[in-house]
Amino acid sequence: MQVQSGPGRRIPVQTPLYLKSRFDDILAQYRADNLFSGYRFTCWVVTNSRFSSDSVSYGECAGLKLMSWDYPAGHSLKEIIERENIYPITVLTKITNREKQLLLEKGVVTCAGLLDNLDVLDSFHFTSSKSTALLKELHDIATFPPEY
């Protein structure tokens, strides 16, 4: 399920309600078909946006695992990104959105992943100055991560 996002938008309570309902339907069918007997399943709702307070209240009450940009404290996406230094290539300012898209299509998602696989940049035919600026930015992010 995809929800419109934007500055200040929060994931409404309808989203975890819908996902929990779909999860329960699928789980009931698995049980009816005796599939995956002996397994336990948990429904997760993960977003790079933020949950409304109603979403969090419902999710906790319904036994959902929730993760968003700023939830749960200590284990939010923002905190995991900062702690593990797994900044997405979308934070880069020295390449265009089209170049970012091409990197994503090549399976490069994080700045650390790009640093580990710089050969992927060969096909871009960057100028020397652009390559230098990009490498500096990648090393800066690895050393002094950006502020969100």
Image: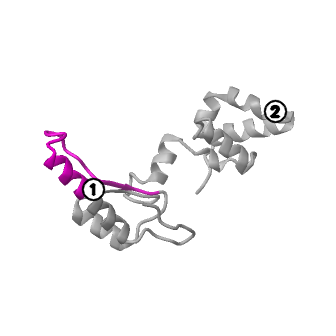
Mark 2 belongs to which amino acid?
His
Q: Is residue 32 magenta?
A: yes
Identify the residue at image location x=40%, y=59%: 71
Which residue is situated farthest in the top direction here? 119
Identify the residue at image location x=45%, y=64%: 50
- Above or below, 89 relative to 24: above
Decide which of 91, 104 is in the foreground and name it.
Answer: 104
The quadrant of the picture occupied by the C terminus is bottom right
Residue 108's x, y, as percent?
Answer: 60, 37
Residue 93's x, y, as percent?
Answer: 72, 49
Decide which of 122, 72 is in the foreground and name it.
Answer: 122
Segment tinted magenta in the rendering: 24-47
Residue 111's x, y, as percent?
Answer: 61, 39
Separation of residues labelled 1 and 2 (CA atoms): 47 Å
The quadrant of the picture occupied by the N terminus is bottom left
Q: In this view, does 108 lie to the left or right of 124?
A: left
Local SS, label 2: loop
| Quarter of image, res 123 | top right
> Which class describes the residues within 10 Å of circle 2: few (<14), some (14-19), or many (20+)?
few
Q: Does the magenta stretch include residue 87?
A: no
Circle 1 is placed at which residue position? Answer: 23
Q: In this view, does 76 lie to the left or right of 93?
A: left
Mark 1 belongs to which amino acid?
Phe
Circle 2 is placed at which residue position? Answer: 125
Identify the residue at image location x=39%, y=51%: 75
